[in-house]
Image: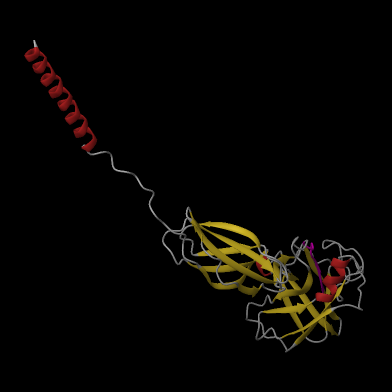
Amino acid sequence: MIERLHKTNYFLCFILFFLCLLNSCEKKSPTEPKIEEPKGSAPAIPSIMQLIPTAQEPNRGMFLMIYDASDNEEGFDIERKTFGGTFSHLTTLPANTETYVDWGVEMSTAYTYRIRAFNKFGNSNWSSEKTETSEGPMTGHIFPVYNIADTYVKKSNPNKNYGNEKSLYISIENNENNENILLLFSLPNLPSHAIEFKSAYLRLCEAGGGNTIYPGLLGIYAAPILDQWNENSVTWNNLPGTWLSTYGYAVHDPNKKSFVDIVVSKVVLEWYSGIRPNRGFMLFCDNNYCCYYSKEGYQSGSACLEIDYIW
């Protein structure tokens, strides 16, 4: 009986030993590797290499050339301020951006910019500041503004209308031959971004084709017309009056230059400001003669205006 109990105890001890051994083996078995977050850093500080004032009508801008000092940025923040002001956020740019144009700045204004890079680990420090002054007043052009009516009148044929002629003649009184040119323009509105009117030029193109030999220099006056007129009915005898207190003037040598530009800024300014109604120009000459293209003769060479404005 005692001997059987001993055998049973040995058997139980063996089983317990085996279970302990299995448990020990399970604790020593390899486990899954621990996943650690990768270590990283914020990007290096970028810089604004160049800051160049630029303009593209109707906007002024600042051109920024950016130096990217890192390869781990996710983007850039740019801040801007004017003289005496504080920085405010201007824009966010994607990674690897090299240039940016800040359109819509005010004219003749000092702007200061700074830039920083960012990624998921944080922001770089702000770059050194860079300052430039935007473009000042600039000149815009409306050209060509072709005439909508043109003709000439002739003293030696006082009742004849020349509204359909292909050339316009101008000459000083010589015996009974005296000719004046009449021109009418539909004045265009200045662009909405224009600050003010600057100047105007009236261009005439000589119609002799280079084969006509003229006597010499021709002095041309361009005076604003006082009364309304019609190119198909106006004659020497019903010629409208003119405002001789304001006029343009230029000298033309048609043997050397095929066109002449007459400065008519004062006349056109009065039209824009409403001082006088726009009823066109009457052209006189103080010596010699010349002929110029009409719109019926050569539309692209007919009388036209160039109007300049400040923006």
Residue 206: quarter of image: bottom right
Q: Horizontal and vertical percent for residue 46?
A: 50, 67
In this view, which residue lies farthest toward the left? 3
Position of residue 102 relative to residue 33, above or below, is below
Foreground residue, 67 or 64?
67
Foreground residue, 287 or 222?
222
Q: Horizontal and vertical percent for residue 199?
A: 77, 74
Q: Horizontal and vertical percent for residue 271?
A: 86, 67
User: From this viewpoint, is residue 57 visible?
Assistant: no
Q: Which residues are magenta?
A: 181-188
Residue 19: quarter of image: top left
Residue 270: say if magenta. Answer: no
* Left/right of residue 311 with respect to residue 278 in the rendered view: left
Residue at x-position 74% and y-position 63%: 193
Quarter the C terminus occupies: bottom right
Position of residue 79 relative to residue 28, above or below, is below
Residue at x-position 84% and y-position 71%: 269
Residue at x-position 70% and y-position 86%: 253
Position of residue 29 relative to residue 55, above or below, is above
Foreground residue, 258 or 100?
100
Quarter the N terminus occupies: top left
Residue at x-position 56% and y-position 72%: 128
* Left/right of residue 270 with respect to residue 7 in the rendered view: right
